[in-house]
Image (cartoon, grey):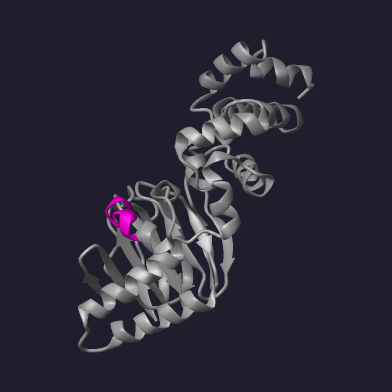
Amino acid sequence: MDRQVRSLNAPPQASVPQWRRRIRLEKFSVEHVPAGERSFNVKLPKTLATISFSTDEGSSSLAGHRLRHYERPPHEHIVVPANFLLRGQSNSAPEVLAFTFQLEKLKPDIAAALQAPPDLLESRVIIGGPKPFTTELARRLRRRMRAETVSQDYLQALGFVLIVEMLRLPPRQQATRRGMTLDDRVLRPILDYIDANLDANLSLEVLAGLAGVETHRFGRAFKRKVGEPPHQYVLARRIETARALLSITDQPIADVAYATGFSSQSHMTTTFRREVGVTPARVRDEAGR
């Protein structure tokens, strides 16, 4: 089993490490990545799409710094938009096919293949499958990648169809134009992510990427659904959580600040004075801690 380890503590890389055979085609690159110990820390200028060939278990974070445990079935595919921070590690990562491409260059061809308006192809995180058709396409492409000689025309055609299928949204999402609204099935994981990652980057861009919605549409849809803009909701959750920690724990105030996403104790104090009317120290005193 190969080792494919990159430091999680270093600045994110702007390219995927070349782990085995990578073939650059006209509008995308495809790489056959062997199973092995793997860690990744990338922020790519292009879209990344992967499909695995066996069960995957490890820890990852779609954005931010906190790694969380995951389990994924064989033949699940993941699409991550350009300029999105992707970090993770696994002691026994599966064999995968990895594609990188510029969505804008492929968008007209993909939209024509899907018979869908191009504006439905927004940059988004997609986790999909397993599906019989994508599984069969991936298996055929893997066999070709393993061969000594490869027809690039065949790889181009097969790889393009696989990319199209990985970007294909369920009919319900296509019909309702997911970017225009947030139903509970989409919103609930976003709210859970906020609560679990208060110390991470929870910018509008990050949250919109997790929801798979364009940034400006996400902000409007979130406010309609929740009643306040995303940044105000995040701030309120940070303050509420910090107040609870100050009241029921003996953690140093500075530690509480960092744990709830404030840049420093003084930043939290300034925010509390403005939003709550009291300082964190006063909250702790009133709780008798």
Q: Position of residue 229 (x, y in %)?
A: 58, 27
Judge by depth and name the residue closer to the eye, 134 or 16: 134
Q: Position of residue 277 (x, y in %)?
A: 67, 10
Q: Position of residue 163 (x, y in %)?
A: 38, 66
Q: In the displayed structure, would residue 226 be above or below residue 143? A: above
Q: How many marks?
A: 0
Q: Is residue 7 visible?
A: no
Q: Looking at this rendering, what residue extends furthest in the bottom direction?
A: 148
Q: In the displayed structure, would residue 20 be above or below residue 212? A: below
Judge by depth and name the residue closer to the eye, 203 or 168: 168
The residue positioned 22% from the left and 77% from the top of the image is: 153
57 to the left or right of 25 = right
Q: Which residues are magenta?
A: 102-109
The residue positioned 60% from the left and 55% from the top of the image is: 172
Tell me the quarter of the picture where residue 147 sits.
bottom left
Tell me the quarter of the picture where residue 70 sits.
bottom right
Magenta: predominant secondary structure element? helix
234 to the left or right of 184 = left
Q: Is residue 159 visible?
A: yes
Judge by depth and name the residue closer to the eye, 19 or 147: 147
The residue positioned 23% from the left and 72% from the top of the image is: 23
The residue positioned 26% from the left and 64% from the top of the image is: 28
- Does the magenta segment cover residue 30? no
Q: Position of residue 227 (x, y in %)?
A: 66, 26
Which quarter of the figure is the N terminus placed in?
bottom left
Which quarter of the figure is the C terminus placed in?
top right
277 to the left or right of 108 = right
